[in-house]
Image (cartoon, grey):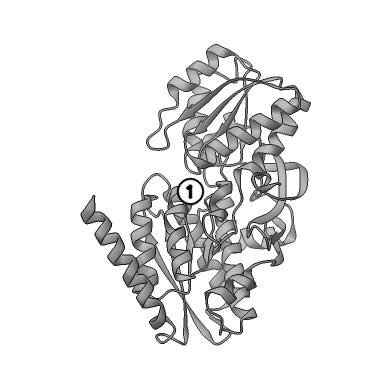
Amino acid sequence: MQRRQLIQTAGLTALALSMSLASAQDSNKFKIGLILPMTGQQASTGRQIEAAARLYMAQNGDTVAGKKIELIVKDDVATPDVTKRLAQELIVNDKVNVIAGFGVTPAALAAAPLATQSKTPQVVMAAATSSITEASPYVVRSSFTLPQVSVAMGDWAPKNGVKSVVTLVADYGPGNDAEKFFTERFQLNGGKVVEKLRVPLRNPDFAPFLQKVRDLKPDALFVFVPSGAGAAVMKQFLERGMDKAGIRMIATGDVTDDDQLNDMGDGALGVVTSHHYSAAHPSPTNKKFVEAFQKANPKMRPNFMAVGGYDGMRVIYEALKATKGQGGGDALLAAMKGQIFESPRGPVYIDAQTRDIVQDVYLRKVEKKDGQLYNVEFDVIKGVKDPGKAK
């Protein structure tokens, strides 16, 4: 333990000493360190975000305000210790101007102290626990929060025949947020939560939990699992005949992830979710984004992780433009706050106080269009701030 602390202390000392040298090197470059899970359980998240980031660069050029943009991609396998080491290497050795990505909450939290110490903006493109932006004053989020999308389902379900629910969530920050904010809103609207179930984040086996749900016979099962795990839940839900037993599945949009939806088969038809992005979002901006993404990445459909990466790159580019290529971390951060723009997901802005994204949240139903499954929007809640930060 002492040896580990000494190593960490030495690393942080090196980090502090290196900051004075950062501006002297690579003055014509602007480096973005993209830390993502490119392998392992969350690999689809990394694949989607990197593809979207590279698409944004292809569309908007790799020179901004006289600076050559360099994207440095590192695989953290969604492991916080690895994330921390990579963030430190990127800041100290590579002299990056921004760190970005962060597929899961523990990874984002691991990097936050380094962002604070080095005054390096940290753009969170995926991780969705409410508290992440409070972990460092240098964190800006371009993805979403679980409270944002869970509250919408807590309002919709009781008005649409769902009186009793069992919740099933992955046992870590976003899952705890989803459980808490859905439950509170569902109960406020007169619904009954029969039981709350939490499954391990790593290598989860949903079977025993789903069997318990089947025995409890609620009107619906509310589910949150991280991107990439939805197909397994859907498969086991259908294998146990829970839909035929009259138990509906309702969920956040992570479960019917666009990246996996077609592989789930027709058993997913009719599943209602609440989320901030669907590849089927009917705006002209999104249609152009989806077309360009699929042209650049054949056999891939952009999901909500892709839009978080795409918009995160926009936030970085616009901040660099606003500082005319001269700004350090504090100037870039100030230029990221308050940005308002039209995203493929709809209108968004970066709240200047919380540094979190404010966006529309949609109710969607899985439907078949042109032989493919899509999350088709049927209702919208406009301009949703993170309820986790409501005073």
* Residue drawn at the location 42% of the way across and 50% of the way down: 43
Q: Horizontal placement of 84 versus 70: left or right?
A: left
Extreme-left residue of the structure: 3
Q: Amino acid at mark 1?
A: Thr
- Is residue 370 among the parts visible in the rendering? no
* Number of numbered tags placed on the structure image: 1
Toward which corner of the image does residue 284 lie, by quadrant? Answer: bottom right
Residue 30 sits above or below residue 3 on the image: below
Q: Horizontal placement of 251 versus 13: left or right?
A: right
Q: Position of residue 373 (x, y in %)?
A: 61, 40
Q: Position of residue 234 (x, y in %)?
A: 52, 30
Q: Regarding mark 1 in the picture, which secondary structure is present there? A: helix
Pointer 1 local density, CA inside 10 Å: few below 14, some 14–19, many at least 20:
many
* Residue drawn at the location 41% of the way across and 77% of the way down: 19
Toward which corner of the image does residue 313 lie, by quadrant? Answer: bottom right
Residue 172 sits above or below residue 1 on the image: above
Residue 12 or residue 62, whichever sits in front: 12
Q: Horizontal placement of 269 versus 42: left or right?
A: right
Q: Horizontal placement of 75 versus 127: left or right?
A: left
Residue 271 sits above or below residue 41 on the image: above
Residue 327 or residue 206, whichever sits in front: 327
